[in-house]
């Protein structure tokens, strides 16, 4: 990915297909929900003083429900973030003078020299 020498606020909020999701990004919430559902089934059996792996149908159902909830929350979060980005992008388009394009700074230009006092 190429980095430009100028920071454009609209460019930061626009996905032009050049951002690739990470490997765990799209599957993290469904996997975490499935593990939580399976753990809830184990905890429920333990709470009722049954063998923790008894009633395998309950484990399968809780795992599926947890995975579905994880997928649902992932989709809801994506929709919320897309709406937020659209609102921010629209605000920047309406008020371009409040968001000027700035030159990119390096750490060496921003940080001051530091000498430890001993």
Image (tube, grey):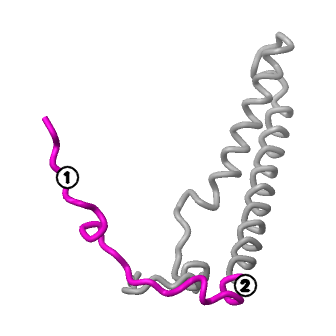
The one of 14 and 78 positioned closer to us in this rendering: 14
Residue 116, placed above or below residue 82: above
> In front: 118, or 34?
118
Question: In this rendering, which labeled residue sits more in front, label 1 or label 2?
Answer: 1
| Image side of residue 38 versus residue 106, left or right | right
Q: Nearer the viewer, residue 8 or 58?
A: 8
Q: Which label is found at residue 36?
A: none
N-terminal of the two: label 1 or label 2?
A: 2
Image mark for residue 90? 2
Q: Is residue 107 magenta?
A: yes
Disc 1 vs disc 2: Cβ atoms closer than 8 Å?
no
Identity of the residue drawn at 71% across and 82% down: 91
* SS at mark 2 in the image: helix
User: Residue 105 is drawn in which quadrant?
Assistant: bottom left
Q: Residue furthest top?
A: 49
The residue at the point 60 percent across, 89 percent down is 97
Q: What label sits on residue 114 in the rendered view?
A: 1
Identify the residue shown where x is 69% and y is 38%. 35
Which stretch appears magenta? 91-118
Rounded to the nearest angstrom, the CA distance separating label 1 from label 2 is: 42 Å
Residue 25 left/right relative to 101: right
User: Which of the 4 image quarters holds residue 113?
Assistant: bottom left
The location of residue 24, given as percent across then percent down, is 56, 57
Q: Is 43 colored magenta in this rendering?
A: no
Quadrant (top left/top right/bottom left/bottom right) for the C terminus: top left
- Left or right of 110 in this view: 72: right
Measured as percent of width and height from the top left, residue 14 is found at 61, 83
Screen quadrant of the N terminus: bottom left
Q: Position of residue 98 (x, y in %)?
A: 60, 83
Q: From the viewer's perspective, is 68 left or right of 107?
A: right
């Amino acid at each position: 990915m190429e980095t430009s020498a100028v920071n454009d606020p609209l460019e930061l909020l626009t996905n032009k297909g050049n951002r690739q999701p990470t490997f765990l990004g799209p599957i993290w919430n469904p996997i975490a929900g499935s593990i939580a559902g399976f753990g809830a089934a184990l905890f429920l059996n333990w709470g009722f003083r049954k063998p923790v792996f008894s009633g395998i149908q309950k484990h399968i159902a809780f795992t599926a429900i947890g995975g579905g909830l994880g997928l649902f929350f992932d989709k809801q979060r994506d929709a919320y973030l897309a709406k937020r980005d659209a609102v921010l992008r629209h605000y920047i388009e309406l008020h371009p003078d409040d968001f000027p394009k700035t030159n990119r700074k390096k750490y060496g230009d921003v940080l001051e020299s530091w000498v430890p006092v001993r």
